[in-house]
């Protein structure tokens, strides 16, 4: 990722932080509307799951300039997801839900440039998590 792309992702994510609980709720709502079968991976408190998701994204976004800082943690998270039954195709569904949520949360600020930057970040995250 270029420094500009990293800046765009970090800036837009920082703007999400005040609404992170709502962002996560909308994200999971969209995710489950796309594939209701994914709900089987989430047996606990969805508010807590949303907080965990936002925290993980925050750590990932904060370390975009030094991805090796979080690469071990992401690989571990990916292994846990495989153990839960997450399949490679589920990452595509996650991607659709994430970009839909970002586009709605950011509105006009979700420009083509911002979307491209987020796609680069998402690819980095998905690649790190998948075996």
Image (spheres, rainbow, N blue to C red):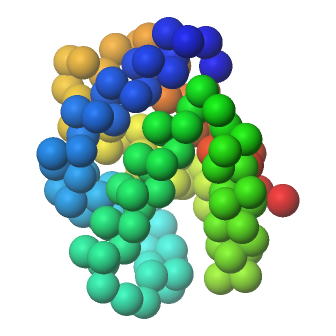
Q: Quadrant of residue 83?
A: bottom right
Question: Horizontal and vertical percent for residue 58?
Answer: 41, 47
Q: Quadrant of residue 49?
A: bottom left
Location of the C terminus by quadrant is: bottom right
Question: In the rendered image, is residue 1 in sight?
Answer: yes
Question: In the rendered image, is residue 87 in sight?
Answer: no
Question: Horizontal and vertical percent for residue 32?
Answer: 39, 68
Q: Quadrant of residue 48?
A: bottom left
The residue shown at (43%, 26%) is 9
As drawn, which residue projects farthest toward the bottom? 43
Q: As rendered, which of 53 and 36 lies closer to the eye? A: 53
Name above or below for residue 84 compared with residue 1.
below
Q: As rendered, which of 25 and 11 lies closer to the eye? A: 11
Q: As rendered, which of 21 and 27 lies closer to the eye? A: 21
The residue shown at (15%, 45%) is 18
On screen, residue 25 versus residue 32, left or right, reads left
Question: Horizontal and vertical percent for residue 7?
Answer: 44, 18
Question: Horizontal and vertical percent for residue 123?
Answer: 65, 37
On screen, residue 65 versus residue 30, left or right, reads right
The residue shown at (55%, 37%) is 63
Name above or below for residue 13 compared with residue 107.
below
């Amino acid at each position: 990722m270029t420094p500009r792309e990293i800046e765009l992702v970090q800036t837009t994510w920082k703007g999400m932080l005040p609404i992170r609980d709502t962002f996560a709720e909308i994200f999971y709502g969209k995710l489950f509307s796309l594939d209701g079968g994914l709900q089987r991976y989430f047996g606990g408190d969805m508010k807590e799951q949303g907080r965990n998701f936002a925290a993980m994204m925050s750590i990932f976004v904060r370390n975009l300039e030094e991805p090796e800082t979080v690469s071990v943690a992401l690989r571990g998270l990916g292994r846990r997801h495989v153990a839960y039954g997450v399949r490679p195709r589920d990452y595509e569904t996650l991607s659709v839900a994430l970009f839909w949520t970002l586009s709605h949360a950011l509105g006009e600020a979700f420009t083509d440039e911002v979307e491209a930057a987020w796609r680069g970040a998402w690819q980095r995250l998905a690649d790190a998590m998948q075996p």
